[in-house]
Structures are given as structure tokens and as C-alpha cells.
Image (cartoon, helix red, strand yellow):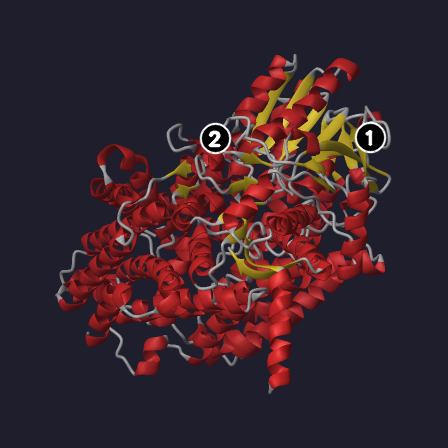
Amino acid sequence: MELLLQTFLNGVLMAGVYALVATGLALSLGVVGIVNFAHGEFLMLGAYLSYLLFAFCGVDPLLSLGLAFLAAFLVGGLTYRGLIRPVLRAPELNQMLLTFGLSVFLQNLALLLFGADTRVVAPPYQAATLALGPFFLGAVPLGAFLLSLALLLALHAFLTRAPLGLAMRAVAQNRLASGLLGIEAEGVYLLTFGLSAALAGVAGVMLSVMLYASPTVGFLFTLKSFAIVALAGLGNLKGVLPAALVLALAEALVSTYVPGGGGLVEAVFFLVLFLALVGRAWRGA
Amino acid sequence: MRKGLGLLVLLAGLAWAQTSLKVGVILPLSGASAVAGKAALNGIQLAAEEANAGGKVRLELVVVDDGTDPSKAVPAFTKLMTVDKVDIVIGGLASGVTFALSGPVKQYGPLFLVIGAASSVVEQAFEGYPLFFHYHPWDYHNVAAALQFFQYLNREQGAKKVAILYEDGPFGSAGIGVYKQQLEKLGYQVQAEPYKTGSGQFTPILTRFRAFQPDILYWIGYDVDALPIAAQTRQVGLRPKLIYGAPPSWPIGFEKNPLSQDVAGMTAWLPTLSNLESRRFVEAYRKKYGEVTEEYMAPMGYVIVKSLALAAERAGSPDKNRIAEALAGLRLNTPFGPLSFKPSDTGKTRYQGFGPEIWFQFQYIQGTRRPVFPKEKASVPLRYPGEYYLR
Amino acid sequence: MRGVFAFLLLFALLPFLPLGVWRAFLLDVGLFVLLFTALALSWDLVARTGQLSLAHGAFFGLGAYGTGLLLPHVGTLPALALGALLAGLGALLLGSVTLRLHGLYFAIASLAFSEVLRTLALKLPFTGGPIGLPVPPPFGGGLPLAGYYLAFAVLALAVALSLWAEKSPFRLAQAACRQSEAVARVLGVRVVRVKLLSLFLGSLVAGLSGGVYAMKALFLSPYEAFSLARAVEALVIPIFGGLYTTLGPLLGGVVLVGLEQALRLWIQEGYLVVYGALLVLAILFLPKGLLGLLGGRRG
């Protein structure tokens, strides 16, 4: 029973970061309508920023969080202006190839600049642990989970209360009608894409503390994010957190209870996804 | 005009006195093994420069990237053979790629000096090929070296239980069956769990290990896993007496991280080694590149070119068979210790350079890696149990 | 059409052209160009029904492993055929449960399928697992051009299928599925059947391409044979060359695979930065792919 609860906790904590990365992806997909294969590279940007600031200026990653948000927002905005806007009306496949090319470009640029080496930061709280009775919670995963949750709540509030947020949802639902209402889609797209990148940038800083910075750190998370977004339903922001929970819990349960389960985690993740999608197909989505 | 001709004759004479060699180098400069590949290339270029400065041989390197991918490696190798027309090739770092090269190597028949490719599957692929010189130890040598350490931990330190985390790719899984069996033979209780490298999710597996209460947490994976394992071991409240890792390389900056304290591992070389050849190498490397490398593939590449230059000098000819003959009889002091070629333990290939003796165990101690085992190589005593246990 | 045949002719005669010292190198590059182009064409064949497959890496891997495992027992050609059939079975399995999914949903489902198969290749007892599987060369290694012409045959088959699909009424059925399934149904197109057949044919070609690859690489590992990179390459080439055509993927394959080899040899460090930048620029300035440059029409 104790092990079960601990496993549950492990899964829930992991779901936070998954949800944060996936929400960014869902935003650009739902509002701008772009399948962004380079989403993970914004995450990588955050991770390297955190590493560089820590290694050369001694800046605590906690402080890098805000900076990474801004930097990734800026890069996201520039990406939108320079690359995404020209292909907004192009076929979906062209958009995908563009973001894929961008991903290859950024990943290898990082490789050229920093090498393929894995880099790590060392803030004092990195392995800090909270022991609640028989349960153990890593302080960093817990912090990352809470921050992710807070960001997602803030985003939710923004989308349901703020005029700009409402505009974003309006555009997401119907491009044409929102235009008729006088909402300027252009500015909304720019903001959304920037925000999407910014969320990934913040997640990147968290991952630099929990894992590492390397040119490929974003890749695995992009893959899982796509899975989560698909499970939630494309563009369905509210569904992202539950979907992330389902997948993270499935992973945690398998790797705790199935002998040799650590090697099956990926397979289970995708099997759950596969079955969910097949289920959706037969319900007639 | 006549003067010019005279000069030409003179130059030709000089070139004649030197043995001039064109050497192909095929390494992963992109793809999964790029870190090791670039380190190796640095070592190779350094040694080539030194050899050329010596004046007795002249090495011209033709470098190609194998991309850590057979579909890129095979054409690149063919280009070395047919366009650049080299007779001698240094390369073969990643096992899978080296396997793919076994076809074209047998077809074109160069002298093949292999820097890595530890998997014994590769040994089978090159069985009977006469010009195959394998410098790196085979995987069974690696196992033997690690087991020696575990035997010591069992006999002298009373370690009884090992929990193994191994990545589920070829690197982590290749020897796992043998490892388990051998450790049990030594008297250990073993629990082994696979994981996906780079995912950073060890909490569930480590939580499970908690009930097992291992003395040693042993992970076979990559540099990306080092920090997450060190951090999450503490976060789940697991208290092994030793965290022991065997990745091909370690993360940059890991030594500065307090979590690395007392983490142990196995390597063939450290820049802090005190033998003369190693110190010479480190100094020359720093002079050329302005930094010190931690990758043992750098001195490995260096050793290969050093031995090749020496063999070419002794052979006095650029002929690959005569160089191979000279190489086979060579004895050379290297940063790893003495090098000479013997038939491999399985008898499948004839020229095996290094064996289990080059491996040693180190521990991260206050920001540097220090050799701790075997005794003749240790610079400080092993800290057992480590700091993560004593908390 | 003439362009397509010129391409095939060029590749058929490549071993006999006076290429000098570059001959062996170009034949090696050519072999991989043929294989990856065939894979790309097989992806395009599926894409014409509006299905974005990320499972082509898996079909490639199934073909490669099927061929590799059977080759020592049944000989080269039967092993290739059976390997392709294995890929085809995989496609039927995937297709029968997912072809009702659209666009990105199908893409993600096919990605998931491919990840699960990779894990199977890692865990099954007879695949060599993570250590990998050695594969003998075709026909016992006696014929130096065997690999090249097998690859050529795979591409020729892919081209034949693609041309058939382009010239027959099947083209209309495919296009109808792509543009609007509802309309297609009204027009009497059996949507699921058309999609399933396209996926099946595509997977056969992908499987053959994997099988020939295995015999050239001589060694398979799950991470490499079932790699997502392969699936992505299969979709990059047609988009780059020109979608829903036969000539487009051919052009794209020769240019991209050739370009990558060339960039790697001559730029070396960081060549993929240039490669990525070229992809981005191509989309920005050549929205119809390379075919757009030639003023080709889109099917």
C-alpha cells in the first residue's frame, strides 16, 4: 500500500512537467494551428540558458526561470514573425517540414556551439528531500510540479478572464468569425506562439536542474508532448493535464511493479496512447 | 631552370628518405558517438603532428565522418579506399558501424586499426581478417576488470547485494547476463532493472530497490543518466554504500556538483595519471588545444598514430603488410601502460592491443576523479561507504 | 513522366558510366539514395490518401528484421519477400484499427505503433535483442553489384506502383480521401479500403527497402532499424521534392540524400546546421518543393 502511494506520488510529480511542455505545444497547435516539431528546441534553449548562467555567472536556476521565460518568448516571437507567418496558409505538411528543419537547425547549432557533451548545474537544493512519514518527495520535482501547476492555472485564468486571452480562444475556435468581430488574429498568433515557447523555456530550466542540458534534451519531451496532446484531443487545453496524469501514472506503475519494467516504460506510454486513439477512432472522432 | 630541377631532385631525395603514408581516418564526428569521435580525432591529429615534426615518417590524414550510422559510414569508407586510395585506416569507434564496415574492409583489404568497437560481435565479424588490429579491450575484458573490483568489495568490504540499473540499448544490455551470473558466482545477491537512457526517470525503480537495500548501486548507461541517478537515489531515500557507474563518458561539470562526491566508476585513463607517457600526452594536448581532455578516446587515438608511425619507421616502407608486420612485433609505452599485440582470448583475431589491465576504478572526491583501485594504481584509498550512505 | 524514366535509366546505367575513381563511392551512395527514395515514395503513396504515416520507420524495420532473420534459412529473394510481407502484415494490423483516425491523430497513432514495435524488437528472444543481429550479404556475397541492383529493383517497384496509382482511377479515389472523406463516400469511394490498400502497398515497398538495407549494413539494432529518424526522412524527402507525385520524391531523394553525403564530406563539422537551414529555406521559397522549380503540376 505504501509502495502504491509512493508510486502514485512519483507519477503525479512527473505529470507536472509533462503537462507544462505539452500545454505549450497544445497552444501553438490549437490557436495558431501549427504542428511545431521545434518545440523541444525552445526547451533546450531554457536548459542551456540555465546552464550557462549557472556555470559562468553563478546564477541560481531559480532566477533563470523568469529570464528563460522572457528569452524563449522573444525567440518564439521572432520565429513566428520570420518563419511561421509566411507559411500560415501553406499546407500542413509544409508547415511541418519547416518546423522540422528549424529543429534540425537549432539542435545542430547547439551541437556546434556546445558540443554533444552532457552538462549539469549544481544548485544546493538539487537533491533536497521532504520525508512525509514513510513517503519521500524530491524538493525539486515537487517544486517543478507546483510551478507547472501554478503556470497552468495562470494560463487558464488568462484564457478565461483577460480580454486578450478570450481573443486567443476566439481565434482558436474560429479564425473567420473572430476576424469579423474585429479581433486581430495576427497579434494573437504572435502572442500565442511566444507564450508557447516561453512555457517550454521554463520547463527547460527545470529540466536542467532535474536532468541535464544537451542538444537532444528536448527531443524526448517533444515526443511525449505530442502523445499527450493527442490523448487530450488536439487543441484541447483543459485535457492536457489529465492526459499527462494518465500517461505519467501508467509509466510509474509499470516501472515500479513490472519486473524489468524500466525498459518497457516507453512501450507502455505509447501503448496506452495507441489504445486510447484506437478507442477514439471506433467511437467515431 | 636547372636550379629548379636541382631543388626538385633534392626535395624528392628528402621525401624518399622519409616514409610517406596516407592514412584514412573514419570516426563519428556527428551522431550519437560524436563526443568520443571528436576526442579521438584530436588525439590522432596531435600524434600525427608530432610524428611529422620528428621527420622520419610523413603522415597525411584523410578524415571522414561516419555519422554513427552505417548508411553514412559505408560510402565514406568506400571513398577512402577508392578515391583517396589509402591502404591504412584508423577508425571503428561505434560497434554497430564497425560491423557494417566489415564487408567493405574485407573487400578492399586495408590495414585496419580499430580504436573502439568493444562488442565481441565485432570480433566475430572480423574473424580471420589478417590485417585487423584492435587496440581497445573487448567487452569481456571490461567485465573482467569490473568483476575484479566487485570481488574486492565483497571480500574486503563485505558488500553482499548489488542493484543494477542498465540502459536497454546495446551498451547497457550486451553484457548484463554475464554480469549477473558472475556477480552471483562471487556471492552477491543481484537485482537488475533496465531503463531508457536520457529519460531521467529513476524514481520508480529506485523506490523498488529500497526494499532490497543494496550495498552497491551499479548503473550501466550514459553520461545523461549520471546526475538524475545521483539526485534521485537521495530523493527516494535509498542508501547504497557505493554508487558505481560505467558510462563511456561523464557529464561536463559533474565533478563540481556536490552530488558527485564518492560516486565511483571505471575508466582506462584520467588526465591526472602519473605515468610519464600520460603526463607527456596531457602537456602536448594542452599546448595544441589549450585545454585538457577527460575522454580516454583522445589518448587512444594518440596511441594508435604513435604506434603506426613507429611501425612505419621500422618497416621503412609504406607497404601495409610490412607495416602490419612491424606493428605486430612492436612494444610501446603508452598513457595506458605498455602496448603489444597478442591473439585475442577467444582466438578469433590475431592482434589484440590492450586487455583488462588498462581499466581501473576511480572515485569523485572533492571535485576531481582519483584512482582508487587496483592498489598499484590507486592514489587515495576507496571511500566506502560513500557520503550518500552516511547522511 | 519522361523525367521519371530518365531517372530510372540513369540509375540503371550508373555502374557502367565512366565515373573514374568516384565509381565505387557513387555506387555506395547511389544504393542508399535508391533505398531511401523508395521509402519516401512509399510514404507518398500513403500520404496521397491524406494519411500522415510515422510508421514507415517501423515498416522499414520489420522488413529489415524479417529479411535478416530469414536470410540464412531461405535464401536472399524469399527472405526479402517474406520480410516485405511481414511489414505488410504490420500495416494491415495498424491500418485496420487506426485508419478511421485523421491527420495528426493517425500520425501519432502510427508513431506509437512504431515505438511499441521497437520495444518488441528489443525484448523478443530471437531478434538478437539490444546486442543486434548480424545479417549476411545478398546471394552469399558473391555478386558485387547484387545489393545495388536489388535496391534499384525496389525503387523500380515503388515507381511502378506510384505510376499505376497516378494513372489509374485509383488516383481519384486517393485524392477524394485526402480532400474530404465525406465527399468521397458520397461519390461511392470505399474510403477505408482505399486507405488500407495504400498503406499495405506502401508498407511492402518500405519493407523491401529495409530488407535490402539490412543486407548492405550487415547488422541491425532495434534503435537504428526502427528509428524515428528514418520515418521522418521518409516524409521530408517527398515534401522537399514535391508531394503527391512520382517525380517529386525521386528528385527530393537524390538531392537530399546526395546533399547530406556531400555536405558531410565537405563541410564536416556542423553540416546538419546547413541541412536544417536548407529545409527551412526550401519551404519558405519553394512551397511546392523542387518540382515547383520545374513548373511541374501537382496531382
Residue drawn where x is 30% and y is 39% of the image: C66
Quarter of the N terminus of chain B within the rendering = bottom right
What is the chain letter for disc 1? B
| Left or right of B286 on screen, residue C173 | left
Where is residue C77? Give x, y as percent.
Answer: 21, 44
C217 or B26, nearer to the observer? B26
Q: Is residue B135 above or below residue B293?
A: above
Residue drawn where x is 48% and y is 66% of the image: A34
Determine if marks 1 and 2 fall on one subunit. Answer: yes
Mark 2 secondary-structure assignment? loop
Q: Amino acid at mark 1?
A: Ala
Q: Is residue B122 above or below residue B141?
A: below
Question: Closer to the camera: disc 1 or disc 2?
Answer: 2
C27 or A37, nearer to the observer? C27
Q: Which mark is residue B378?
A: 1
| Left or right of A195 on screen, residue C276 | left
Residue B197 visible in the displayed image: no
| Left or right of A5 on screen, residue B259 | right
Q: Amino acid at mark 2?
A: Lys
Residue that mark 2 sits on: B348
C195 or C165, nearer to the observer? C165
Mark 1 secondary-structure assignment? loop
Q: What's the distance in space between the residues labelled 1 and 2, CA to CA?
A: 33 Å
